[in-house]
Image: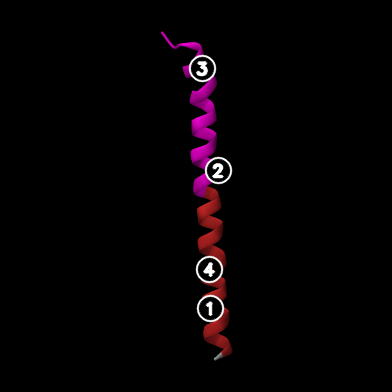
Amino acid sequence: MATLLDVVYGPTETFYSIHEASVSHLLEKDVFIENKNSALGR
């Protein structure tokens, strides 16, 4: 049986891992775009 902590923190952990994944994905995209722009600029 799930404890109160499991109920509270389970979804929160899932949310944060999804959030972190999307943030790192966005950052990678930004870095990629910057690299592309600097390569074009040279």
Q: Secondary structure at mark 1?
A: helix
Separation of residues labelled 1 and 4 (CA atoms): 9 Å
Q: Which residue is mark 3?
A: 7
Q: Which residue is mark 1?
A: 36
Q: In this picture, is 27 found above or below 33? A: above
Amino acid identity at mark 1: Lys
Quadrant in which the C terminus appears:
bottom right
Cβ–Cβ under 8 Å for marks 2 and 4: no
Going from the N terminus, do you reach mark 2 or mark 4 first?
A: 2
Q: Secondary structure at mark 4?
A: helix
Residues in magenta, as a range:
1-21
Q: Return the x and y of residue 2 as percentages of the image width and height.
A: 44, 12
Q: In this picture, is 6 found above or below 35? A: above
Majority secondary structure in the magenta region = helix
Amino acid identity at mark 4: Val
Amino acid identity at mark 2: His
Quadrant in which the N terminus appears:
top left
Question: At 55% across and 83% down in the image, what residue appears?
Answer: 38
Q: Return the x and y of residue 24 as percentages of the image width and height.
A: 51, 54
Q: Which residue is mark 4?
A: 31
Going from the N terminus, do you reach mark 4 or mark 3 first?
A: 3
Q: Which mark is residue 19?
A: 2
Separation of residues labelled 1 and 3 (CA atoms): 44 Å
Amino acid identity at mark 3: Val
